[in-house]
C-alpha cells in the first residue's frame, strides 16, 4: 500500500507542534532572538568570577539562552522529521544546527572561568541566596576542573567540532549512501539489489540459503572497502585519544565516561560480569542449533526466530490498551500521564512519505515529550510504543519535579526507563496468554533482545575499549589487526557452537556505534538495570521508589539517582539478578521447545 502524503494523515494521528510555536513565523522570531541574545552572553566573558553576582548573572544568562535554543531546535528537528522532502523545513533544521554551534562557541568561556575562581572564593559565593540552589550544578562543574582548558582553548576546541566529527560523517556517507551491495533473491524468488533494510529481513528468513546469500553478499562489499573503513575508524579513535590527552584524562574511556559523573568501574564491572555469564549465551546458541537442526550455527543463523511468527495483528488503538494494562503496576498517577500523551497528541503515529524512519522520544523542558513512530500492526510496534513512552514519562516527571537546571537526565539513566517498560510489557503478555506457542514466541523475543542488548553491546564495548587502547599505545589500527581481534572476540562471546565465518571478523566495519565514543556500554547496563527494576516493581512493591528515580533528573549523581529506585549500579549484583531472569526465561523456553 502506498504511503500517504503528510497532508493526508489524520490530524489525530499527528503530533501537535503548535504547542511549541504556534506558527513558523513565531519560530523565526525566536530564532532571531537567540541570535541577539548570543551576543549578550558574551559580555560576561572575562568577568564571571568577579563576584557572586556576576557568577549568577552569567550562569542564568547562559541557561536562559540554552533553554530558548532547545525549543527552537526541537521544533525544527521534528517538523523536518515528519516530512524530510520538505525543503523549507530542511533549511530550518540546517539553520538551527549552525546556530547551535554558534551558541556553543559563544558560551564556551563559562566553565573554564568558573573553574578558575579560587576554591575558597567559590565556596563563599555558593553560600549566597542567589547561588545556593545551584550547589550540585557547581559540584559537577568542579569535578571537571582537572580536565578543563583555558577559555580560549575551549572555544578553539568547540569551533573544531566539525573536524573531529569528520570521520563519523564520512562513515555515515559511505554506509548510508555510497556502498553498493550485490543482488540477492527475495522470499518470492525475485532478484533485487540488497539494502541494509532488506538484509535485516532476510536474516530472519526461514530459508537458510537466502540468509547465507544475504550475509555473504553484504560482507563482500564491506570487505572490499575494509581499508577505507579502517581508515575512518582509526582516525575517529585518534580524535578521541587526542581530546583525552589534551584534557589530561588517563584514557579516552575515562574522557567519555567521567563527564557524566559515572565512575569507570561501572564499565569494567560490566565487562567482567558479562564475561562470567557467557556460558548462558553459549547455551542459548546451543538451543538455537538444536531447534534449527543444523550441524553448525553460522552467524547468519543468529537472527532467525526459533518460534514461528504468531497471529497477533494489533491496531494502534488496541496497542494503547495493552500498554496501559502492562504499565498498571506503576500506579494510577503514571497511567494518567500515559493517557495524557494519547489524548493531547504527543505522538506522531503513522508512516507517511518522507517521514524519518524508526522511532524516538524527544522534547525539551518547555515542550511536551513527543514520540515519533512509524506504526505497523504488529507486536514489535507495541514494544516500541511502550519503550518510547518510558522515555517520555521519564522526561515528563523530571521536568515537573525539577527546575530547568536539573530538568534533564544523563544518557546513562535514559535507557533504563524505556527498557523497564518493555520488561513490564513482557511480564504482562506472558501472564495474560496461556497459549504455549504465544509464550514461546514472547520468551524468544525477550531472550533475543537481551542477547542483542546486554551481550552484544558489551561485546561492542569491549572491542571499542581495545581499539582505543591500541591506538593510544601507538599501534596501527589496520583492517587485518581489527578483524583478527574482532573475530576472536566474537567467538569468545558465542562459543563453540558458532561456526567461525570469515566474514563476521569484518563486522566492526559496518557498526556505527563504534563512532559514538563509549556510548554502547550504557545500553547493556540500562537493560540489566531495567530487568532488575521490573522484578522489584512486580514483586517487591518497588513502584514508588522507581518513580522517585524518574523524578530526580540530574539533581544528584547518576548512581545516587538510580539508587533511589533500589539498584546499586556500582556493584555487580544488579547484573547478576538480570542474568538470573535471563536464565529463568531460557529454562522456560527450553521446556516449551523440548522435543
Image (cartoon, rainbow, N blue to C red):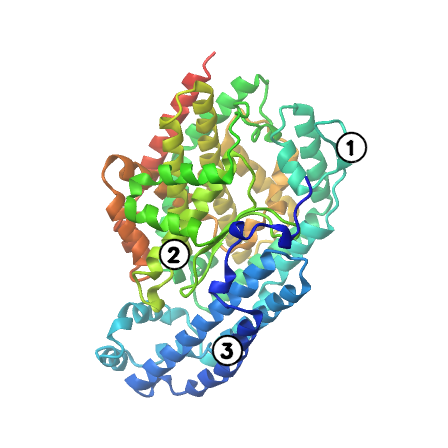
Relative to 358, 571 lies left or right: left
Question: Which label was assigned to residue 450?
Answer: none
Marks 1 and 3, Cα distance to the nearest angstrom?
A: 53 Å
Label 2 vs label 1, nearer the camera: 2
Q: Which residue is mark 3?
A: 34
Q: Residues within 10 Å of mark 2 (few under 14, many from 20)?
A: many
Q: Secondary structure at mark 1?
A: strand
Instruction: Specify which label sits upstream in the sequence, 2 or 3.
Output: 3
| Residue 493 or residue 55, whichever sits in front | 55
Question: Which label was assigned to residue 395?
Answer: 2
**Quarter containing the N terminus:** top right
**Residue visible at 21% across and 78% down in the picture:** 127
| Residue 328 seen in the figure | yes
Label 1 vs label 3, nearer the camera: 3
**Residue visible at 39% across and 21% down in the picture:** 434
Q: Which residue is mark 1?
A: 191
- State whether residue 199 is above or below residue 550: above
Amino acid at each position: 500500500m502506498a504511503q500517504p502524503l503528510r497532508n493526508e494523515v489524520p490530524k489525530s494521528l499527528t503530533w501537535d507542534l503548535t504547542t511549541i510555536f504556534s506558527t513558523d513565523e513565531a519560530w523565526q522570531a525566536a530564532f532571531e532572538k537567540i541570535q541577539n541574545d548570543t551576543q549578550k552572553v558574551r559580555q560576561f566573558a572575562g568577568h564571571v568570577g568577579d563576584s557572586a553576582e556576576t557568577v549568577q548573572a552569567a550562569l542564568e544568562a547562559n541557561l536562559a539562552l540554552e533553554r530558548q535554543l532547545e525549543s527552537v531546535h526541537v521544533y525544527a528537528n521534528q517538523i523536518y522529521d515528519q516530512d524530510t522532502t520538505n525543503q523549507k523545513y530542511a533549511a530550518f533544521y540546517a539553520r538551527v544546527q549552525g546556530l547551535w554551534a554558534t551558541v556553543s562557541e559563544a558560551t564556551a568561556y563559562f566553565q573554564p572561568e568558573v573553574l578558575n575562581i579560587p576554591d575558597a572564593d567559590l565556596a563563599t559565593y555558593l553560600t549566597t541566596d542567589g547561588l545556593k540552589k545551584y550547589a550540585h550544578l557547581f559540584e559537577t562543574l568542579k569535578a571537571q576542573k582537572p580536565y578543563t582548558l583555558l577559555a580560549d582553548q575551549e572555544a578553539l576546541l568547540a569551533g573544531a567540532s566539525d573536524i573531529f566529527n569528520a570521520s563519523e560523517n564520512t562513515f555515515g556517507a559511505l554506509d548510508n549512501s555510497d556502498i553498493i551491495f550485490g543482488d540477492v533473491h527475495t522470499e518470492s524468488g525475485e532478484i533485487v539489489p540488497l539494502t541494509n533494510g532488506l538484509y535485516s529481513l532476510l536474516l530472519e528468513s526461514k530459508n537458510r540459503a537466502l540468509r547465507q546469500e544475504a550475509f555473504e553478499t553484504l560482507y563482500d562489499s564491506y570487505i572490499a572497502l575494509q581499508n577505507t573503513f579502517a581508515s575512518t575508524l582509526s582516525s575517529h579513535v585518534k580524535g578521541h585519544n587526542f581530546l583525552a590527552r589534551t584534557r589530561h584524562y588517563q584514557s579516552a574511556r575515562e574522557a567519555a565516561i567521567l563527564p557524566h559523573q559515572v565512575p569507570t568501574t561501572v564499565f569494567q564491572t560490566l565487562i567482567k560480569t558479562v564475561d562470567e555469564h557467557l556460558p548462558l549465551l553459549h547455551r542459548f546458541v546451543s538451543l538455537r542449533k538444536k531447534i534449527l537442526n543444523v550441524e553448525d550455527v553460522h552467524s547468519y543463523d543468529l537472527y532467525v526466530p526459533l518460534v514461528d511468527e504468531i497471529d497477533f495483528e494489533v491496531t494502534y488503538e488496541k496497542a494503547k490498551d495493552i500498554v496501559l494494562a502492562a504499565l498498571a503496576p506503576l500506579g494510577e498517577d503514571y497511567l494518567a500521564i500515559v493517557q495524557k500523551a494519547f489524548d493531547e497528541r504527543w505522538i506522531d503515529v503513522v508512516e507517511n512519505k518522507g517521514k524519518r524512519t524508526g522511532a524516538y522520544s524527544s522534547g525539551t523542558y518547555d515542550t511536551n515529550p513527543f514520540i515519533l513512530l512509524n506504526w505497523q500492526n504488529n507486536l514489535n510496534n507495541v514494544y516500541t510504543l511502550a519503550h518510547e513512552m518510558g522515555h517520555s514519562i521519564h522526561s515528563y516527571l523530571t521536568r515537573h519535579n525539577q527546575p530547568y537546571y536539573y530538568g534533564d537526565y544523563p544518557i546513562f539513566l535514559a535507557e533504563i526507563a524505556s527498557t523497564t517498560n518493555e520488561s513490564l510489557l513482557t511480564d504482562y503478555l506472558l501472564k495474560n496468554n496461556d497459549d504455549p506457542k504465544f509464550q514461546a514466541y514472547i520468551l524468544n523475543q525477550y531472550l533475543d533482545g537481551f542477547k542483542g542488548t546486554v551481550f552484544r553491546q558489551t561485546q561492542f564495548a569491549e572491542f571499542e575499549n581495545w581499539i582505543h587502547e591500541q591506538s593510544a599505545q601507538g599501534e596501527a589500527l589496520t583492517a587485518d589487526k581489527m578483524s583478527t581481534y574482532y573475530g576472536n572476540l566474537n567467538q569468545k562471546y558465542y562459543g563453540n557452537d558458532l561456526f567461525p565465518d570469515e566474514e563476521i571478523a569484518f563486522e566492526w566495519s559496518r557498526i556505527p556505534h563504534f563512532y559514538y565514543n563509549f556510548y554502547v556500554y550504557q545500553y547493556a547496563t540500562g537493560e540489566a538495570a531495567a530487568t532488575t527494576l521490573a522484578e522489584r516493581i512486580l514483586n517487591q512493591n518497588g513502584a514508588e521508589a522507581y518513580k522517585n528515580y524518574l523524578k530526580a533528573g540530574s539533581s544528584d549523581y547518576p548512581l545516587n539517582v538510580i539508587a533511589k529506585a533500589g539498584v546499586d549500579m556500582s556493584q555487580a549484583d544488579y547484573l547478576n539478578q538480570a542474568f538470573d531472569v535471563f536464565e529463568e526465561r531460557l529454562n522456560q523456553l527450553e521446556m516449551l521447545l523440548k522435543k
